[in-house]
Image (cartoon, grey):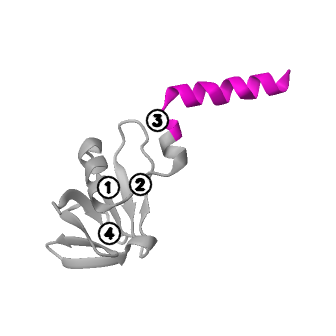
Amino acid sequence: MTPLSASFFDGRMPRRQAVEVLAEGNEIVIRGVFGERRAPRAQVDISEPLGRGPRLLRLPDGAVCEIADHRVFIDWLAAAGFADSPVVRLQARWSWTMAALAGLVLERF
């Protein structure tokens, strides 16, 4: 699998570090000048897309990887076997959002 380029913040110091992120088996691996850090996939929180803001991988120890390129990140997630939550998928479709809004309005009448 192709590594993902990201910015890493260790959760202790406000210093950005360039890293590569990989998915190996049941772990997320982060490699940088500090060496290598690993976290179980199930314990890594993936932020939802919010406009043009960076996506985040939050590790259980408080460290964060920031990914600026949404398209590359979406492709990496798919290749790594991750899937967006149903809420994220619904938010990406305006037709579902409008249907939910119409349902809410009709329920009030």
Amino acid at dot 3? Ala
Q: Residue furthest right?
A: 109
**SS for tag 4?**
loop
Which numbered circle lies on residue 77? Answer: 1
**Residue 17: where, in percent of width, then height?**
20, 63
**Residue 104: where, in percent of width, then height?**
74, 28
Q: Are marks 4 and 3 in contact (CB under 8 Å)?
A: no
Look at the image and tell me in which quarter the N terminus lies. Answer: bottom left
Decide which of tag 1 and tag 4 comes sooner along the chain: 4
**Residue 40: where, in percent of width, then height?**
38, 77
Position of 97 relative to 2 (above/below): above
Q: Are marks 1 and 2 in contact (CB under 8 Å)?
A: yes
Amino acid at dot 4? Met
Pick whichever, 47 or 24, lies toward us.
Answer: 24
User: Badge 3 is on which residue?
Assistant: 92
Magenta region, residue range: 90-109
Mark 1 → mark 2, Cα distance in angstroms: 7 Å
Mark 1 → mark 3, Cα distance in angstroms: 16 Å
Other-residue count near label 1 (Cα within 10 Å), few / some / many at <14 / 14–19 / ≥20: some
Q: Is residue 98 magenta?
A: yes
Look at the image and tell me in which quarter the C terminus lies. Answer: top right
User: Badge 4 is on which residue?
Assistant: 13
User: Badge 2 is on which residue?
Assistant: 83
In the image, taking residue 100 as reference, residue 88 lies left or right, namely left
Pick whichever, 103 or 38, lies toward us.
Answer: 103
Other-residue count near label 4 (Cα within 10 Å), few / some / many at <14 / 14–19 / ≥20: few
Pick whichever, 88 or 47, lies toward us.
Answer: 88
Mark 4 → mark 2, Cα distance in angstroms: 31 Å
Between tags 4 and 3, which lies in front? 3
**Picture residue at 26% right of the left edge, 42% below the top:** 71
Mark 4 → mark 3, Cα distance in angstroms: 34 Å
Between tags 4 and 2, which lies in front? 2
